Amino acid sequence: MGAPGLVAETVWNKMESTRSVTEDQLSILHFLFGKNMERATRIVDQRGVKRISGEPSGRFVFQVVGESRRLEEYLCFPERYCACYSFFYDIVSRGDQLFCKHQLAARLGAALGVCINVKVSDEQLAELLAKL
């Protein structure tokens, strides 16, 4: 994970425990993630993060809106994966970033408790994930 990842994890954990964000925390995250954090904040402000939970298992995935005019939605596991092009290009291929804006938006929305919660059956969740 490295030092930047550990610093970010500490900030996320503090935000999750208080369900709030301070100016200092946002400054740290902006320093670590730059424009991706700005974009993630806009997505969260526009209520663009859904937390889709399967029942009865409780397993979940995030669905995050993109910023293009087409308003595509990307399935996302905040700490591991996003289905967007930027994830593969900037993170997997080039290693330029730690996370894409969708991963950051999902993490921010979850930390602040502002995700739109959607409950589906475990079968529906499996079908959604099978499309990846």
Image (cartoon, rainbow, N blue to C red):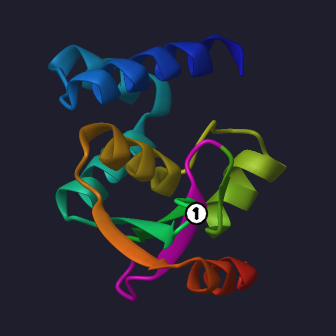
**Horizontal relation, residue 34 to residue 23: left or right:** right
Q: Residue at x 39, y 51 (%)?
A: 105
* Relative image position of residue 44 (x, y in whole percent): 26, 55
* Type of amino acid under label 1: Ser
Q: Secondary structure at mark 1?
A: loop
Name the image quarter holding the N terminus: top right
Above or below 83: residue 29: above
Looking at the image, how many numbered discs can be counted on the residues? 1
- Give the x, y percent position of residue 42: 25, 55
Single out the residue that lies furthest toward the front. 56
Residue 77 belongs to magenta span: yes
* Foreground residue among 126 and 50: 126
The image shows residue 74, relative to residue 44, as above or below, that is: below
Which residue is label 1 attached to?
57
Q: Nearer the viewer, residue 77 or 44?
A: 77
Residue at 38% x, 83% y: name it.
71
Identity of the residue drawn at 18% across and 29% down: 20
Q: Which residues are magenta?
A: 68-79
Q: Quadrant of residue 123?
A: bottom right
